[in-house]
């Protein structure tokens, strides 16, 4: 691995860490886990939670990010 590849890796890793830090800071304001397509079922003893809309949004974001960085 040469210096250019190492530098590029460090820049990408740093950018990801900065974005992840902002996500954690704004986590209370982002309604992930409480969207209209997140289903909750149950009673006092048993609770079932199925975050369908949240999973779809996260999957879409990850797909877009991976496609953006994998283009040559």
Image (cartoon, rainbow, N blue to C red):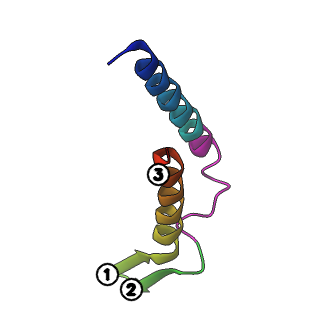
How many numbered discs, if any? 3
Tell which circle, 3 or 2, labels the residue nearer the N-terminal end. Answer: 2
In the image, residue 57 lies at what x, y percent?
54, 67
Determine whether 10 is above or below 68 in the image: above
Cβ atoms under marks 1 and 3 closer than 8 Å: no
Residue that numbered label 2 is attached to? 42
Residue 12 position (above or below residue 68): above
Q: Is residue 51 left or right of residue 23?
A: left
Q: CA distance from mark 1 to mark 3?
A: 37 Å
The rendered magenta stretch, by its main secondary structure, is classed as loop
Q: Residue 66: which disc? A: 3
- Quadrant of res 37: bottom right
Decide if residue 26 is on the left or right side of residue 46. right
Residue 60 appears left or right of 2: right
Which range is magenta? 22-34
Image position, residue 58 (x, y; %): 50, 62
Q: Which residue corresponds to mark 1?
A: 46
Mark 3 vs mark 2, CA separation in Å:
36 Å
Is 33 contained in the magenta span? yes
Which numbered mark, 1 or 3, is in the foreground of this view? Answer: 3
């Amino acid at each position: 691995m040469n210096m250019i590849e190492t530098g590029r890796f460090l820049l990408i890793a740093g950018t990801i860490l900065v974005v992840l830090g902002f996500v954690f800071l704004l986590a209370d304001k982002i309604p992930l886990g409480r969207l209209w397509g997140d289903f909750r079922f149950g009673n006092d003893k048993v609770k079932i939670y199925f975050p369908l809309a949240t999973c779809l949004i996260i999957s879409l974001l990850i797909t877009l990010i991976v496609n953006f960085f994998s283009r040559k």
